[in-house]
Structures are given as structure tokens and as C-alpha cells.
């Protein structure tokens, strides 16, 4: 058992640090450019150096490195320390690019992968519908092939970033006669066309991160399909062998927890710092048990990934674990805020009343609920853990409806 | 970066498990649990022959020279199997002597402890939940007077390592004058407890007793956490197995989401904490400045999880789960032991808070 990276990898860390030292932030005239433009130029150099887009072939703009989860972790750590840009975030790089690399046709890869990883193209994901949430495969949006192009009619919902996306990857029903999972196709759609009506949804936090998207006779060329007709369900579940970031969420959780401890030092209960209150101390220390367990589970997963062994059921649990911890941290934070928890985080509410940025905890209190739902509700995660992890039988209704 | 067990460590766990599968199957476990003594000398002898009695003792004294992590891995497996016997007290006593004993004390006791020819235990708690070294009040000296609570299998021990005022440790031998041992009716019948009463009883202090006592405390917390991880993991498996076989409404009850989610929650509560006890054990030998606090957090966290999972496991088994004949009760009571022995989670959370400077 050894939590150090060892000599060879520490040598690699020096190499990464040396590159960053020379390359970020940009110097000379380039330093005057806007952040986005600087990031684009920096990423090109980082790809050339083999530090970014490591699992993407060179011909599609990547750096095509041997998969190595430990090197990937070192890169994240060093780039984090230097505040250097990583790959553009977003559903395009996270979801679409791996799918295209595995299942896309040659022209699709050439057209979309390089532009997406450069950050030139923004994508949104057209999966959920008003009547199809946890039972996604029951989706009803239709796609019909008419005169050599797909004509799409229906409605998508919870579509993050639809306001600003250039393209959407969408699941539509193209084979209405087939059993439900076999009737779906995976299409790519240009968002800048008539027939697409994007309406942002206002969240309980007041912001609008996601939208409803209404599609009326929306068109896309016949060959903008990924995989074959009726294979969309499988295509959407494509996962690529990649350098899983198994300790990313544990680092976020630890940062959130230190913020909470700081908050407890700054707030008062009965005229004394809250951190001296016996109940608060108990709750903080109890939470730290979860935070630390999550942290070491992450190290174990990282080690197993590096050895090419299966980490086991823990990989199915990470979302629910970080969600649970996020809830508990938010709950304790709101108790520490006391009467200030009556205020709204923005506008004339808490942001106006308070200094020190404590209003972020009000937002976090609500956002932690959004995270419990997004990308598969906690109850769906429990089904996955129960069925695939513990080997329990499938839910009877789900079993019937998939036939 | 290698946060995983070695092949030897995995093999150690597998060997112990196979041994217990053969030598202490469910029927034997129930007999020992129900029996007068709660202790099977042949089973302990077998474990000692495998090297478990001296796993962590120095090789020069006949031990295997391994680390607290290896002890903890054995503890996990014993917890998983609910193995009855004196492992915990014996391991801690040997650890204390190896750490704080004089050469003469080590030469006299460690070889016998390593082979299991002599059995040792530790006497820590005093009246009112005074578990920790700084709470001990039995005055140190050439003879000891006072009372110690919750001493594991003291009635079978040849040697008792006794905590004394000022946080030191002293050795008391089985036939010492004025030593009285009263077995008490323990909930966990796999690790029975005694009260030890000392009346001007001859004792021999460990020269480095204070250092040894803190190491003993931290190692004990880690071994309890490891036992709790193993036991909780087993309870999840037993509950899942029951859900796959018990039928109601014409299907196995594992089909029902209410139960499926409860079982998933149990697994989510315990599975991540494997690494927490590994690290706490590892820290005791390699990351000294984190060891004390990590041990406190691991014990508080994992024994709390074990207790809740034990309650959930009873519920998941329905009516049968509440009966004496259902094995869940054996693990349930081990959970009660792991949680309460050396102090409840609240005690160790407060210690962790203080150590963090909160």
C-alpha cells in the first residue's frame, strides 16, 4: 500500500509542470487576448504535448496516448494547480465525442470530433421527454424518413444548454412497430433551423440551466444518423474505454466539506463560534466519516483502474454517494445560516444582505436536490445498484414493459 | 499509487476465511454462541497454528513481523464470519508489549503469545465509560488496586495488560494474588467480557507504557472498524440472499422496489468504507501524524454503519430476523460490541473534532 505515485510518475509530473510553466498563462502579445481565445491556443499546444484529449486519435484532433489513469490524474492535478484550461467541458466532449468515436461513420468523426474538442461546437442532448423520464425508452418523438431526410416531430425536456447549442444529439422513434428499445434511432440535428422552439425552464433557484425543446418538422439529412436505424438505444449507451476520473468527485466533496468547516467557524450560535457547539461538532465529524470513506474508495478505484482490474460495485455507487454527502453538507450549512436561511440567494435577498459569499450555501441547498435527479434519479440509481450490483431480480413492471 | 492489498494480503484473508468455513461453520458458531464458555480452545489453537496469534509480533520473538493493516484484514474476516474467540484482546496485548515492553518482558511473553501457548488480553475500561488512557485511574505501581470493566475473555487469559493512571500499562499474571475475575453476561456471546478486580495485586509496568497505550488504543479502534466492515458486508450479503429466496405474492421479495432500495442503501452505506479502515490501519505504521485522528473517525463511522445495517438486516428478514434461531442476531450483537467497545461514536467524533482544532 503506497499512496505516492512513485519515481517514474513523479518524473512525468515534473514534465507536466515544466510544460505548464512555459505555456500557461500565455505570454507576450498573446497574454492580451481574451480568456477563451487564450484557452483555444493553449489547448492546441497541450494536445500536441500529449496532455489533453488523450483518448482521441490524432486524425480527429486528439493526442492519441496510451490509456493511463495515473498520468491522467497527474495531469488533472497539475493543470488544476496552474488553473490551466482542460478539455472544453460540456456534453459534447463528455457524451457525443466518445459515442462518435465508437459508433460514428468516418465523415461524422471528421466533421464533428475535432470541432467539438476545440470548443467550436456546442451540443445539447435530446433524451428526456415530458412522458419519458426514468422510462426513457418509452420516448415518443417521431423521426420519419421523407425524400432522403429525417423529419422530426415531438418534444424534449430538461435539455441543458439548448439555448446556446449549435447541434443536438437526439433519440427519436423511427420504427414505431418495433419493440420499444428497438424502435429508436440516434440522430444529429442542427439547432439553427426553423421548427425548433427552445423555451428555458425556470428552476427553483431562479436560474434557467435547462430548457424545453419543441420540434416541429425539424429536418436533418439521412446520413446524420449514428449507427443503424433502430440501434439508437444501444448507441446511446456506448461507453468508451477511457481514463475514468475516479477521484474527481471525491476532491469536489472534500472542497465542499472544508468550505462547510470554514462556515462553522464564521457563524455564531448563542454568541459563540458554531464550531464550538457540541451538536455541530458531532455532525461535522460524522460527515467527515462519509467524506473520508468516499476519498479512500476513490483511491482504491484509481488503483484498480490502473491495474486493469474491476473495482466492483463501488463504481455504480459513486453518484448516489456524492449526492448523499452533498445533501448532508447542504443541510448542515443551512442550519449554520440560521435566520439568514430565510433569504433568497440572489437579488435583494441574501446576496444583498450579507458579505463573505455565504449566499452560495442557499443555492447549494437547492442545487443538491437537482443533482439528485439529474442523469438518473437516486431511486433509479438504487435500482441499478440492487439489480446489477447485488444481483436482485428486475422490477416486474420494468421487465414486462421491455418485452 | 497503489491503494490496494497485496496478493499475500488477499491470500491471508482467503486462508482465514476457508479455515473458519471448515472449522467454524454456522452450526458450530451457534453452539459456541449458545454455550456456557463462548470460547472453543481447539478453534483458537487452530488459528494460532495458522500464525494469527503472532501475526504482528516481531520475527525475533517468533511472530510474523507484519503490520497493523494485516491484523485489520484478519479482523475484517473474523467480523465477516462472526468468529468467536479471543483474537482482539490477544492481538492488542501483544501489540502493547511489543511496543512498550522491556527486553525481558518481550523475551518472556512474546514467544508464548506468538504461538498461542499463552493467551493475553487487555483491561482498559473503568466505571462510567472511562475507556481511554487519560481517563484511567487505577494507580500505577508494583501492585495494583481497583476495578477494570469489559475485559475480553479475562477468565481464560494467562496475562492481562492493565491500563493505569497517567495512561501507562502494567502486566498482571493469571495467578497473581488478589486478582478476581467475574464473567459478566455479555450481549455478544462470541467475545465474552469479564470484570477484573485487583486488590493489591502484583504488577509489572511496561517501561514505555504511555506510548504503547496510545498505540494500543488506536490499533483497537482500527480493528473494531475492520471487524465492523466485515460484519456489515456479511449482513448485506445475508439480506440479499434472503431477498432472492423468500417468496411473497408469488415472486421472490427481491423484486419489490421497497426492499431493493433498502438493500441498495445498506450496500451504499458500507462498501465505500473499506478504504477508510485500510488507510487508518496503514497510517498507524506509516503516516504517524494522521493515525490517531483517522482511527477515531474510522471507528466512529464504520461501527455506526454496522449498527444501522444490523437493524436494517433484521427488518429485511421479517419476523424470522427477530428470532434467536436466525443468525442475524449474532452479527447484530457483534455490531453492538464494536460500536460500544472503547467508547461510542460520539466520543471519537468529539476527539476527532478536537484533534482538528475545531
Image: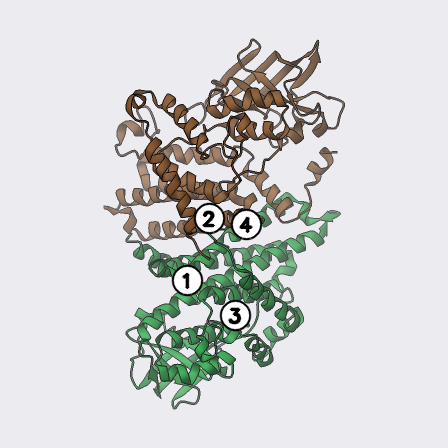
Q: Position of residue B38 (x, y in %)?
A: 56, 77
Rendered image: mark on residue A307: 4
Chain represented in brown: A
Name the subunit of mark 1.
Answer: B
Chain B drawing hue: green
- Tag in front: 4 or 1: 4
Secondary structure, mark 2, is: helix
Judged from this view, the residue extending furthest toward the left is A271
Judge depth for marks 4 and 2 and give the one in front: 4
Q: Marks 4 and 3: same chain?
A: no
What's the residue at 53%, 67% (across, down)?
B74
Residue A253 visible to the viewer: no
Percent x, y for residue A47? 45, 30
**Which circle marks residue A294 in the picture?**
2
Q: Nearer the viewer, residue A150 or B336?
A: A150
Residue at point 46% right, 40% down? Answer: A72
Reply above or below: B144 against A187: below
Query: Mark 1 — residue?
Result: B344
> Is residue B43 found left or right of A248 in the rendered image?
right
Disc 2 + disc 3, Cβ < 8 Å: no
Q: In the rendered structure, are the residues bearing label 4 and label 3 in contact, judged by CB atoms less than 8 Å apart?
A: no
Location of residue A345 with respect to B11 vertically, above or below:
above
The numbered dot on residue B187 is 3
Amino acid at each position: 500500500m503506497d499512496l505516492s505515485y512513485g519515481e517514474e510518475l513523479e518524473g512525468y509530473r515534473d514534465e507536466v509542470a515544466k510544460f505548464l510553466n512555459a505555456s500557461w498563462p500565455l505570454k507576450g502579445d498573446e497574454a492580451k487576448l481574451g480568456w477563451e481565445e487564450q484557452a483555444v491556443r493553449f489547448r492546441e499546444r497541450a494536445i500536441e504535448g500529449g496532455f489533453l484529449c488523450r483518448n482521441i486519435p490524432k486524425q480527429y484532433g486528439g493526442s492519441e496516448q496510451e490509456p493511463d489513469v495515473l498520468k491522467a490524474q497527474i495531469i488533472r492535478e497539475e493543470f488544476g494547480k496552474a488553473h490551466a484550461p482542460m478539455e472544453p467541458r460540456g456534453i459534447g466532449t463528455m457524451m457525443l465525442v466518445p459515442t462518435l468515436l465508437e459508433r460514428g461513420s468516418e465523415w461524422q468523426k471528421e466533421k464533428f470530433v475535432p470541432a467539438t474538442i476545440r470548443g467550436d461546437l456546442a451540443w445539447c442532448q435530446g433524451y428526456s421527454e415530458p412522458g419519458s423520464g426514468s422510462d426513457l425508452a418509452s420516448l415518443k418523438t417521431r423521426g420519419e424518413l421523407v425524400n432522403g431526410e429525417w423529419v422530426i416531430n415531438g418534444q424534449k425536456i430538461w435539455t441543458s444548454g439548448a439555448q446556446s447549442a449549435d447541434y443536438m444529439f437526439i433519440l427519436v422513434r423511427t420504427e414505431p412497430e418495433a419493440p420499444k428499445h428497438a424502435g429508436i434511432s440516434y440522430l444529429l440535428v442542427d439547432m439553427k433551423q426553423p421548427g425548433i422552439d427552445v423555451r428555458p425552464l425556470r428552476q427553483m433557484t431562479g436560474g434557467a440551466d435547462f430548457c424545453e425543446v419543441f420540434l416541429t418538422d425539424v429536418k436533418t439529412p439521412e446520413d446524420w444518423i449514428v449507427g443503424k436505424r433502430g440501434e439508437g438505444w444501444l448507441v446511446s449507451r456506448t461507453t468508451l474505454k477511457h481514463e475514468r476520473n475516479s477521484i474527481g468527485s471525491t476532491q469536489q466533496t472534500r472542497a465542499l466539506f472544508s468550505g462547510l468547516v470554514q462556515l462553522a467557524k464564521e457563524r455564531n450560535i448563542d454568541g459563540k463560534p458554531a464550531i464550538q457547539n457540541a451538536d455541530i461538532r458531532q455532525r461535522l465529524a460524522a460527515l467527515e466519516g462519509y467524506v473520508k470513506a468516499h476519498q479512500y474508495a476513490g483511491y482504491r478505484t484509481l488503483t484498480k483502474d490502473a491495474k486493469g482490474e474491476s473495482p466492483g460495485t463501488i463504481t455504480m455507487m459513486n453518484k448516489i454517494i456524492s449526492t448523499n454527502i452533498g445533501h448532508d453538507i447542504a443541510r448542515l450549512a443551512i442550519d449554520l445560516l440560521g435566520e439568514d436561511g430565510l433569504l433568497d440567494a440572489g437579488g435583494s435577498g441574501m446576496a444583498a444582505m450579507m458579505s463573505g459569499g455565504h449566499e452560495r450555501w442557499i443555492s447549494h441547498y437547492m442545487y443538491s436536490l437537482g443533482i439528485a435527479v439529474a442523469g438518473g434519479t437516486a431511486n433509479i440509481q438504487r435500482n441499478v445498484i440492487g439489480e446489477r450490483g447485488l444481483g436482485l431480480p428486475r422490477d416486474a413492471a420494468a421487465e414486462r414493459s421491455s418485452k | 499509487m497503489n491503494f490496494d492489498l497485496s496478493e499475500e494480503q488477499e491470500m491471508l484473508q482467503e486462508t482465514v476465511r476457508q479455515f473458519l468455513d471448515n472449522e467454524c461453520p454456522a452450526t458450530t458458531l451457534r453452539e459456541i454462541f449458545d454455550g456456557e464458555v463462548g470460547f472453543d480452545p481447539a478453534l483458537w489453537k487452530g488459528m494460532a497454528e495458522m500464525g494469527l496469534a503472532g501475526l504482528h509480533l516481531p520475527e525475533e520473538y517468533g511472530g510474523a513481523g507484519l503490520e497493523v493493516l494485516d491484523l485489520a484484514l484478519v479482523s475484517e474476516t473474523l467480523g465477516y464470519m462472526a468468529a468467536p474467540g479471543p483474537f482482539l484482546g490477544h492481538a492488542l496485548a501483544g501489540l502493547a508489549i511489543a511496543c512498550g515492553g522491556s527486553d525481558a518482558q518481550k523475551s518472556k511473553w512474546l514467544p508464548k503469545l506468538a504461538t498461542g501457548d499463552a493467551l493475553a488480553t487487555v483491561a482498559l475500561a473503568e466505571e462510567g465509560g472511562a475507556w481511554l488512557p487519560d481517563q484511567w485511574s487505577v494507580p500505577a505501581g508494583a501492585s495494583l488496586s481497583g476495578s477494570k470493566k469489559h475485559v475480553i475473555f479475562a477468565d481464560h487469559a494467562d496475562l492481562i495488560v492493565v491500563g493505569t493512571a497517567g495512561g501507562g500499562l502494567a502486566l498482571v499474571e493469571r495467578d497473581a494474588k488478589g486478582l478476581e475475575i467475574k464473567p459478566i453476561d455479555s450481549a455478544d456471546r462470541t467475545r465474552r467480557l469479564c470484570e477484573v478486580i485487583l486488590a493489591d495485586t502484583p504488577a509489572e509496568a511496561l517501561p514505555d507504557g504511555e506510548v504503547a497505550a496510545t498505540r494500543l488504543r488506536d490499533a483497537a479502534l482500527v480493528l473494531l472498524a475492520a471487524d465492523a466492515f466485515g460484519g456489515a458486508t456479511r449482513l448485506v450479503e445475508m439480506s440479499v440472499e434472503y431477498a432472492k429466496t423468500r417468496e411473497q405474492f408469488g415472486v421472490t421479495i427481491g423484486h419489490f422496489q421497497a426492499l431493493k432500495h433498502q438493500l441498495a442503501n445498506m450496500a451504499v452505506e458500507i462498501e465505500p468504507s473499506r478504504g477508510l479502515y485500510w488507510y487508518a490501519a496503514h497510517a498507524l505504521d506509516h503516516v504517524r501524524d494522521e493515525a490517531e485522528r483517522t482511527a477515531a473517525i474510522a471507528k466512529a463511522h464504520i461501527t455506526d454503519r454496522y449498527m444501522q445495517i444490523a437493524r436494517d438486516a433484521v427488518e429485511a428478514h421479517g419476523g424470522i430476523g427477530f428470532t434467536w434461531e436466525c443468525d442475524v442476531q449474532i452479527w447484530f450483537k457483534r455490531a453492538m460490541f464494536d460500536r460500544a467497545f472503547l467508547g461510542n461514536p460520539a466520543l471519537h467524533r468529539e476527539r476527532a473534532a478536537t484533534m482538528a482544532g475545531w
